[in-house]
Image (cartoon, rainbow, N blue to C red):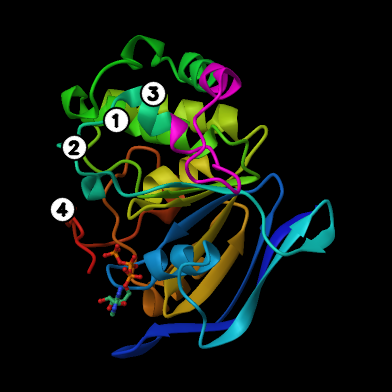
Amino acid sequence: MNKLIDIANLTVGYENKPNVLKDINLSIYQDDFLGIIGPNGGGKTTLLRTILGLIKPQSGSVTFYDKGEKTASINIGYLPQINRIDKKFPISVSEVILSGLTPGNNIFKRYSSADRQKVKEVAERLGIEELLSRAIGDLSGGQLQRVLLGRAIVDNPKLIILDEPSTYVDKLFETNFYKLLGDINKEIAIVLVSHDVGTIISLVKNIACVNQGLHYHPGTDISQEWLLNAYESCPIEILGHGSLPHRVLLEHDHQEGGSHIHQ
Ligand SMILES: Nc1ncnc2c1ncn2[C@@H]1O[C@H](COP(=O)(O)OP(=O)(O)OP(=O)(O)O)[C@@H](O)[C@H]1O
């Protein structure tokens, strides 16, 4: 299995909050579908932002690979938490998807007809071609989710990172959305952050639990021992039980999910 990203002895924090992540190690593979779970404030978003190069680590390294060779960076698509999008911003669906294309060296570059063709193809693949001329403010949560997924994949990334994609999306849409992810994962590695361990287990190939440290579990055949262990160092919130394998159902609090606001 070819590695895409290798994280070694990584410690990351903020000026007023050091060691949000402490000495973590993680590999992400070319065909990976990695689920990241963990409690509020455990450092999931900090990990994603570090992988995206938005935060400089205190120590340790993030190394990228292309076809087994080290490289300075790889193309990564990012799907932010939907509640962080300003829906009042007057921009159309096609403009949002176009904005996922790297402008190259010239930030004033006009998009070409080839770019617009790419947007059309992505929209067709995601079943949102009818929406292309609509303003994002007119979309439902589920439609906006697909548009943001389109923006994340339009530039043919090697990896897409999704931060809690199911927030505010209704159940039916969520199922379709996750089907789309399965389809996209045939070509693109996916890192998916979720509070919902049930969703994670039914979808992903490998799991990491982040709570300052990182527990990695290859595969999703999770034993009670691992979960109990993870519970101790990484108290997971279980929100959805539908797809959770029977053997991992333990005693737990039934907590409701809320919105998560980041500084
Ligand atoms: N820009 C920042 N400056 C200072 N502290 C921050 C900043 N961003 C996050 N933190 C702190 O770092 C810790 C980890 O936050 P992070 O958002 O990475 O966790 P998370 O696991 O993604 O949480 P959630 O599940 O709520 O989204 C929290 O205590 C948070 O308050």
Marks 1,2: beta carbons within 8 A: yes
Nearer the observer: mark 3 or 4; the answer is 3
Dot 1 amino acid type: Leu
Q: Nearer the viewer, residue 200 or 49?
A: 49
First reached walking from the N terminus: tag 1 or tag 4:
1
Ligand 1 falls in which quarter?
Answer: bottom left
Residue 120, compared with residue 227, is above or below; it is above
- Whether tag 1 and tag 4 are in contact, CB under 8 A, the answer is no
Q: Which residues are magenta?
A: 98-118
- Residue 62 horizontal side relative to residue 97, left or right: right
Type of amino acid at the residue the image marks with label 3: Ser
Magenta highlight: main SS? loop
Q: What number is the disc on residue 87? A: 2
Q: Residue 87's quadrant in the figure?
A: top left
Give percent across and percent down for residue 39: 31, 68
Q: Earlier in the sequence, mark 2 or mark 4?
A: 2
First along the sequence among labels 3 and 4: 3
Measured in 3D between alpha carbons, the distance from the residue under mark 3 to the one under mark 1, in whole angstroms, is 12 Å
Q: Find disc 1 in the rendering and name its residue.
A: 144
Q: Nearer the viewer, residue 36 or 55?
A: 55
Instruction: State the mark number for residue 256.
Output: 4
Which element is circle 3 on? helix
Among the two numbered marks 3 and 2 on one chain, the one whose residue lies closer to the N terminus: 2
